[in-house]
Amino acid sequence: MDFESVIYGQTFDSLEGAIRSTSARQKQIAQNIANIESDNFRPFNDVLKNALSKRESKEVMLDREMTNLAESNLKITSYAQLLSSKLKILRKVVTLGKG
C-alpha cells in the first residue's frame, strides 16, 4: 500500500468521479437549455430514449431542464463539501491536531 492511497483512498476517487459525471450532466443540461428555442428541439436524453411526447410544451421542457440543473448543482456542492471535510480531517491528522 503506497502513501498516496492511504492519504487519499477510495473516497477521493469516488468523489472525483461523482463530480466529473455530474459536471458532464450539467454541461448537457445547459446545452439543452440553450437550444430549447430551436425548431424540433428534443433534449439529448430524450433523443436517446425516444421518450419525448410531441404534445409536451417547451415551457414544460424548460422547467424540467432547470430542475435537472438545480439538482446537478446541489450534487456538485454536496460532493465538494464532502471532499472539503475529508481534506480538513487529513490536515488535522498531518498537523497532529494542532491546527
Image (spheres, rainbow, N blue to C red):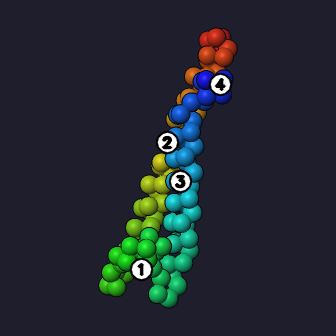
**Residue 84 falls in image quadrant:** top right
User: Which quarter of the rendering shows the C terminus?
Assistant: top right
Question: Which residue corresponds to mark 4?
Answer: 2
Amino acid on which the number 3 mark rests in the picture: Ser
Q: Identify the mark nearer the N-term, 4 or 3.
A: 4
Percent of width and height locating residue 89: 57, 22
Q: Nearer the viewer, residue 33 or 86?
A: 86
Question: Which residue corresponds to mark 2?
Answer: 78
What residue is at 52 percent from the left and 85 percent from the top? 38
Question: Which residue corresponds to mark 3?
Answer: 21
Q: Nearer the viewer, mark 2 or mark 3?
A: 3
Q: Identify the mark nearer the N-term, 1 or 2.
A: 1
What residue is at 54 percent from the left and 78 percent from the top? 35
Q: Are marks 1 and 4 in contact (CB under 8 Å)?
A: no
Q: Are marks 1 and 2 in contact (CB under 8 Å)?
A: no
Q: Identify the mark nearer the N-term, 2 or 3.
A: 3
Amino acid on which the number 2 mark rests in the picture: Ser
Cα distance in 3D space between marks 2 and 3: 14 Å
Identify the disc placed on residue 58: 1
Q: Are marks 4 and 3 in contact (CB under 8 Å)?
A: no
The answer, for residue 90, to whether it is visible in the render is yes
